[in-house]
Image (cartoon, rainbow, N blue to C red):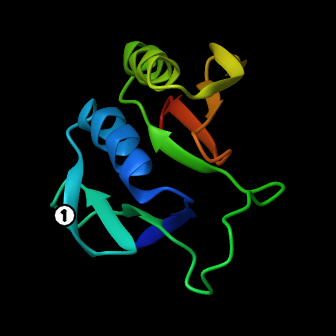
Amino acid sequence: MIGYSTIGVNDMDRAIAFYDALLGEIGAKQLFGMDRIKFYGKGDGGAMLAICIPYDEKPQSTGNGQMVAIAGGGEEGVKKLYAKARELGATDEGEPGERIPGMFYGAYVRDLDGNKLCFFDMKGA
């Protein structure tokens, strides 16, 4: 259903270093882009995540209530992504743990520009 989501950034080089390393943990990589936007995915036609300098060239700002959720591929994958993001300078917004018993396991961070990310494992989905 979702083709891609876009996250605004202020420093493209810094954001590329962060997302190359972070998304590489789940087998994703830069697929294509231009100077102001880069698209990440697994190249299988699935959903993508894009990082971009805002089109209006005004400073990036975070949206209240906006978040991008990235499948971790299991609880260990969630823990691995959370640890990698923190290692890369992300701030904690909720350590890995069960949020809905037996159904949803997640962890939350803010990237280097303050965008909220969730790493999750949903049982039965």
Q: Residue at (46%, 15%) from the top-left corner?
A: 83
Query: Looking at this view, is 102 or 110 the one in front?
Result: 110
Against 46, is 29 above or below? above
Left or right of 92 in this view: 37: left
Residue 120 spot, x, y in % from top left: 53, 31
Q: Which quarter of the figure has residue 72?
A: top left
Against 85, is 15 above or below? below
Give the quarter of the figure containing the N terminus: bottom left
Q: Residue at (57%, 64%) from the top-left corner?
A: 8
Against 36, is 49 above or below? above
Q: Secondary structure at mark 1?
A: strand
Against 97, is 61 above or below? below
Q: Which residue is mark 1?
A: 31
Query: Looking at this view, is 84 or 74 the one in front?
Result: 84
Q: Residue at (37%, 44%) from the top-left corner?
A: 19
Left or right of 89 in this view: 97: right
Q: Which quarter of the figure has residue 112?
A: top right
Residue 61 spot, x, y in % from top left: 73, 61
Q: Which quarter of the figure has residue 41?
A: bottom left
Q: Is residue 2 visible?
A: no
Q: Residue furthest bottom?
A: 56
Q: Is residue 31 visible?
A: yes
Q: Residue at (42%, 58%) from the top-left corner?
A: 12
Alpha-carbon neighbours of circle 1 within 10 Å: few (<14), some, or many (≥20)?
A: few
Give the number of callouts: 1
Say what amino acid the circle numbered 1 marks: Leu
